[in-house]
Every structure is written in structure tokens, then in C-alpha cells.
């Protein structure tokens, strides 16, 4: 009962055209969550969306901040060059007493020489004024660029704070939901068991769906160089993020890729494996933490081909697709999350698209 209720609440599996197996578990598996638990999950989902929005904004601001920093660097370098040129001109004028001293103009040998020296003086004065004007303009632009850079960094810091706050909200709401879910599960089990004590029921481990199958990972091949890739090839998209269905009580928490059993499953990006588990609603599944703060999950696998703590590259094979757990047909259930826990997901399709991967 405990495992079935957990599957109803948290399952990522979904029915597919590729799978004709009967749904696992009684009809109770599709019963709606109690209002408070459902509200906590809705709050976690909303906070995940805020996290994603802040992450996108922060990514754009980091790019803008890098451009601003380069502009400041160019301005500082240009200003140093202009100052050196102004210094050289000033030293030359000091040594020669100006472009063409009046005493030398009066002692010229001919009108032609006099006109030449006057022309040279005008040209020198004009060049000096232009150099001075350029220097002042560069100084003004540099002041603006520095202010722009400071403003961008300030906004970036504020968005990072909002992002961290959203992530903490997700974690807090999910923790509250898990506590309430355990209480609800224990209450239902106690009502169904009659005289059996609640403590005895809680001591019984939850049954798992699907066996754990691990095999050593294949030899690593040459790296394609791509930063982000598709989790599988030769797929058909089936149940999408936040879609409704009888296989889950609230809404679908990821994107399903309908593929045959044994299809290679690959890490969509570089990261560290933080979870490899078997049984439960997700069957054999893997969770990877990526350096950008997100987590990805790969569920219903027939085989796991990586280990917790392993560092994987984008496109590296980590398992084989299957039909384990709360699943009605062979497929890969793929999630993108703000935290390692279910309930903190964001829509995987636009998330991948924003990273150059169209599915």
C-alpha cells in the first residue's frame, strides 16, 4: 500500500503507444492527493518555475556582464594609450616651446617658409585638440561602461539571491510534502490493516517495482564535443511535462521518450551521478547533478551502467531503457529538476531547446 500510494503521487511513468502492458497497481493509485499535500507540490512547482526564470535571466546577464567587462577593459587600454600620446605631445611642446615659437616665425628667411610654419602650427594645434577631445570622450565612455558593469553585476547578484531563495522554497515545500505524504500513507495503511499497529506497519519496508539490474558501463568512446545532447535516439515523444493522466495523481513530472527496451540512454550533459536506485515508481533510475545547478533524472531503465559518484560527459552512456517501475510500456522518463527530489521539475523540452538541443 505504501509503495502504491507513493507511486500515485510521485510516479514519472506514463502510458505510451509503444507499450500495451496493463497498468500496475489498483485503481486507488490514481486517487487525488489530500488538499494540503497537493498545495505543497503546487507551491514547489511554482518555486521551480521562479528558479528557472531567474536562471535564464542570470544566464543572459552573465553574458551581458562579460561584454561590459570587455568594453571596460578596451576603454582602459585605449585611455592608457591616449594618455601616453598626450604626454609625448606635451613633452615635445615643452622642449620646442610650442609648435612654432613666435621668435622663430619672425626670423624666417622667406614668406613661403613662414606660411609653411604657420600651417604646421595650425595642424599641430588641431591634432592636439582632436587628441584631447578623443581622450575626454574615452574617459566619459569608460565611466559609463564601469557604471553599466556595476549595475549588471548588482542585478546578477540580486537574481542569484532570488534563485537561491526559490530553490530553498522548493526544498522546504518538498520536505513538508514528504512528511505529510508519509503520515497520509501510514494513516491509510492503518485504516486498511485494522488492529495492526501503526508502528508495525511503518517498520515494514515498501515493496519495490522492478528488479535492480546493473552492468559495467561500456568503454568510453571519443567525445563529440557537444555540451548538451538528447538522452536517447530513435524515439517518439509521448507523455509531456505537466500532462494529466490516470497513471499519476497530480501531473506528469517529466518528458517521456517512447523507445524499445535496451535503447542506450545517455547523459544529456556533463555532471556527477548523485543517485542510482532501483524499485519504486521510477524503477531503475539515475539522477545526475550538472554544474549549472540543475539535476536530470533517467527512469524506468532495464539496466544501470554507471555508479553513484561517477563523473560523466555529455553523451556518455549511463544505462539502457526499459519498463521497470510504474510503467505501462517501454520508454525513458526524463526529468529536469531544481533539486534531486521529484516535485522540483521544470519542463525538459524548452530546457533542452535553450541549450541547443531540439527534441
Image (cartoon, rainbow, N blue to C red):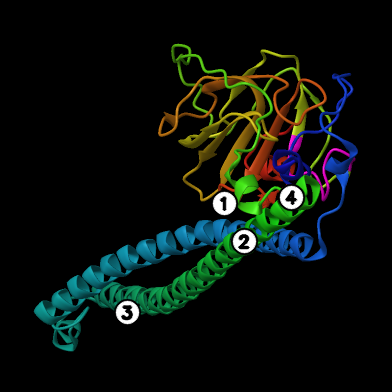
What distance separates the C-alpha of mark 3 from that of mark 2?
67 Å
Dot 2 crowding, Cα within 10 Å, few <14, some 14–19, many 20+? many
Q: Residue at x 50, y 59 (%)?
A: 62
Span colored in magenta: 245-255
- Residue 344 seen in render: no
Which mark identifies residue 125?
Answer: 3
Labels 2 and 4: the sequence-earlier one: 2
Q: Is 253 within the magenta?
A: yes
Q: Is 173 within the magenta?
A: no
118 to the left or right of 1: left
Labels 4 and 1: the sequence-earlier one: 4
What distance separates the C-alpha of mark 2 from that of mark 4?
37 Å
**Which is closer to the viewer, label 1 or label 3?**
1
104 to the left or right of 117: left
What distance separates the C-alpha of mark 4 from that of mark 3?
104 Å
Q: Quadrant of the N terminus?
A: top right
The residue pinned by badge 4 equals 195
Which mark identifies residue 170?
Answer: 2
Amino acid at each position: 500500500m505504501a509503495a502504491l500510494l507513493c507511486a500515485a503521487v510521485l510516479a514519472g511513468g506514463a502510458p505510451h503507444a509503444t507499450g500495451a502492458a496493463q497498468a500496475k497497481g489498483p485503481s486507488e493509485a490514481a486517487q487525488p492527493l489530500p488538499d494540503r499535500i497537493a498545495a505543497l507540490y503546487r507551491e514547489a512547482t511554482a518555486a521551480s518555475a521562479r528558479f528557472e526564470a531567474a536562471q535564464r535571466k542570470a544566464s543572459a546577464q552573465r553574458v551581458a556582464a562579460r561584454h561590459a567587462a570587455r568594453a571596460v577593459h578596451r576603454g582602459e587600454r585605449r585611455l592608457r594609450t591616449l594618455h601616453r600620446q598626450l604626454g609625448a605631445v606635451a613633452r615635445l611642446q615643452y622642449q620646442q616651446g610650442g609648435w612654432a615659437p613666435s621668435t622663430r616665425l619672425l626670423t624666417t628667411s622667406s614668406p613661403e617658409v613662414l606660411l609653411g610654419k604657420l600651417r604646421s602650427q595650425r595642424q599641430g594645434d588641431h591634432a592636439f585638440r582632436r587628441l584631447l577631445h578623443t581622450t575626454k570622450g574615452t574617459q566619459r565612455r569608460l565611466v559609463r561602461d564601469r557604471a553599466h558593469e556595476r549595475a549588471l553585476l548588482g542585478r546578477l547578484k540580486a537574481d542569484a539571491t532570488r534563485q537561491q531563495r526559490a530553490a530553498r522554497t522548493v526544498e522546504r515545500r518538498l520536505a513538508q510534502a514528504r512528511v505529510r505524504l508519509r503520515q497520509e500513507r501510514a494513516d491509510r495503511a492503518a485504516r486498511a490493516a485494522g488492529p495492526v499497529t501503526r508502528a508495525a506497519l511503518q517498520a515494514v519496508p515498501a515493496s519495490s517495482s522492478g528488479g535492480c539490474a546493473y552492468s559495467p558501463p561500456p568503454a568510453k568512446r571519443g567525445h563529440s564535443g557537444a555540451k548538451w545532447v538528447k538522452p536517447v535516439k530513435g524515439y517518439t515523444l509521448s507523455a509531456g511535462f505537466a500532462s494529466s493522466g490516470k497513471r499519476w495523481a497530480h501531473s506528469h513530472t517529466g518528458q517521456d521518450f517512447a523507445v524499445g527496451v535496451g535503447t542506450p540512454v545517455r547523459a544529456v550533459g556533463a555532471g556527477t551521478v548523485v543517485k542510482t536506485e532501483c524499485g519504486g515508481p521510477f524503477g531503475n533510475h539515475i539522477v545526475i547533478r550538472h554544474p549549472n545547478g540543475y539535476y536530470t533524472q533517467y527512469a524506468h531503465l532495464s539496466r544501470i551502467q554507471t555508479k553513484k559518484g561517477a563523473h560523466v560527459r555529455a553523451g556518455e552512456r549511463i544505462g539502457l531503457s526499459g519498463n521497470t517501475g510504474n510503467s505501462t510500456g517501454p520508454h525513458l522518463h526524463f526529468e529536469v529538476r531544481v533539486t534531486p527530489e521529484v516535485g522540483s521539475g521544470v519542463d525538459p523540452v524548452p530546457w533542452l531547446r535553450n541549450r541547443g538541443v531540439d527534441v
